[in-house]
Amino acid sequence: MATPITVLSSAAQIGEVVAEQILDRLAAADRYVVGFPAGRSATPVAAALGRLALQRGVRVDGLQVVMMDEYVTGQAGQWELLSPSTPHSCIGWAQRNLLGPLGLRPDSLIAPDPNEPGALEQEVLALGGIDLFLLASGQGDGHVALNGPGTPRDAPTRVVKLPESTRRDNLSTFPHLRSPADVPTYGVTIGTAELAELSHSVAMLLWGPNKAYAFDRVRQADSYDPMWPATIVHDCRNALIYADEEAAPKSEREGVS
């Protein structure tokens, strides 16, 4: 069955709607686990979280952040995570956009370990799973986290070599990177298997005109297509897709709420 799609007017509105959902759950629970992609797709959610939490007086210290991936350097058995001070570090993005603005403790953030990638599943299971995983799609190749085209449905958390298509896509994720050569070659990523199996609910965020093709590819699928890994959204429980009017042109919005 195809995943329900909601089209909103802007990226800011998507951010507010998703942030409201997170804050509603936080207000009713001691802990709420949210998986985040780094970069522009989730930035409206992060911005709205801080502003709305202050307006509503909601405590956010129960928010547990799970980052889906990070770039690495080195070699097998001796991988090193990119320094968080690096502008395109995924963990650094979380520190700057979530932990700092929300006043969260450092242990409110977990990310996959490139030298022990299987440990992420155990950490997430110890938390009771991921309550809400925010997903994004590569605009040109449909990568989700760092799972590129050709990723099997049962791929685990692992270190991957980034294909050229994903490295090109990441130029828009982190605009200070000027060419694919500036994008790290390797990264550690949660697998498509864990995205589907460990998440209680997911929300895919597609906004801006450069995500129109990604929206179309995801919309046309109804199950996982390894050549466009972001279609894993259709295999996830309690999944929703949020798009803005730029990503979902009017001619492509027939039948979409």
Image (spheres, helix red, strand yellow):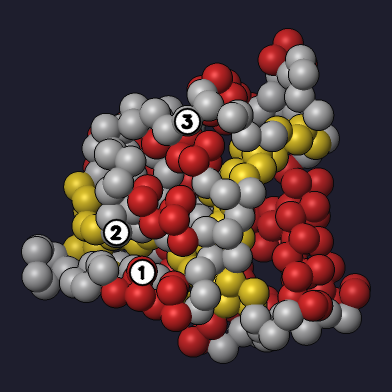
The percent position of residue 248, horizontal first and vertical second, equals 69, 24
Q: Most extreme residue toward the front, as rendered? A: 1
Characterize the local packing of mark 2: few (<14), some (14-19) or many (20 or more) Cα atoms within 10 angstroms: many
For the residues labelled 1 and 2, say whether their Cβ atoms are less than 8 Å apart: yes
- Asked which secondary structure carries label 1, the reply is helix
State the image coordinates of residue 136 (x, y, percent, origin top left).
53, 44
Q: Which of marks 2 and 3 is in front?
A: 3
Q: Which amino acid does label 3 sit on?
A: Ser
Residue at the image point whose x is 75% and y is 35% from the top = 6
Could you say whether the residue bearing mark 3 is in a helix, strand or loop?
Answer: loop
Label 2 element class: loop
Residue, disc 2: 157
Q: Name the residue under label 1.
A: 121
Q: Is residue 85 visible?
A: no
| Numbered disc in front, either 1 or 2 | 1
Residue projecting furthest to the top = 251
Side of 28 relative to 85 (left or right): right
Q: Quick check: 129 above or below 168?
A: below
Closer to the chain start, of discs 2 and 3, is: 2
Q: Which residue is drawn at 62% across and 84% down?
A: 104
Image quarter where the N terminus lies is top right
> Which residue position is annotated with label 3?
223
